[in-house]
Amino acid sequence: MSHLKNTGFSDRISAAAEAKKAMLAKMKPKPTVTDPDFDKREELRAAELEAVRAARAAAREAARLEQAAKQELILAAKRAERKERKADAAAEQRMRKEEKAAQREQLRSLGRTSKSARAHEWGNLIG
């Protein structure tokens, strides 16, 4: 079959060289077209990124302030509860003092009566 084409050695070598050149031309990097708006797009991206960062920082600050407000409410509730407990304890102590004073007064009044009346009153107070 190679006799039908009548190709010689030099023809085959030149055909191989041309094929090699064609393959190399395919692999060669093609010149790129630069976008004239490249810088503008880069600036837009940077501005968008800055806006996102600012929004995130604002959200973090809002969350921090909200958390601080919650903590303040909790502390205020604890303070109010503590004040209420102190007021209750003071009222209870006052009641006890008044009761003791009333008992002392009763005992003093018993001291001026007869011995049997005092014993009877003491029995009522104890029992």
Image: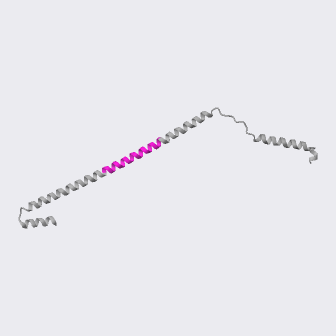
Question: Residue 45's spot in the image, x, y percent?
Answer: 57, 37
Question: Residue 102's spot in the image, x, y percent?
Answer: 14, 58
104 versus 37 height, above or below? below
Question: Residue 97's spot in the image, x, y percent?
Answer: 18, 56
Q: Is residue 50 left or right of residue 111?
A: right
Q: Nearer the viewer, residue 24 or 124?
A: 24
Residue furthest top as drawn: 36
How many labels were placed on the picture?
0
Quarter of the image with the C terminus is bottom left
User: Quadrant of residue 42 in the image?
Assistant: top right
Q: Is residue 83 one of those drawn in magenta?
A: no
Question: Residue 3's spot in the image, x, y percent?
Answer: 94, 46
Q: Is residue 76 one of those drawn in magenta?
A: yes
What is the span of residues highlighted in magenta in the rendered image?
58-80
Residue sitting at x 41%, y 46%: 67
Q: Is residue 108 left or right of residue 50?
A: left
Residue sitting at x 36%, y 47%: 73
Majority SS type along the magenta span: helix
The colour mode here is: one colour
Q: Nearer the viewer, residue 57 or 126?
A: 57
Residue sitting at x 46%, y 44%: 60
Q: Is residue 92 left or right of residue 50?
A: left
Residue sitting at x 13%, y 65%: 124
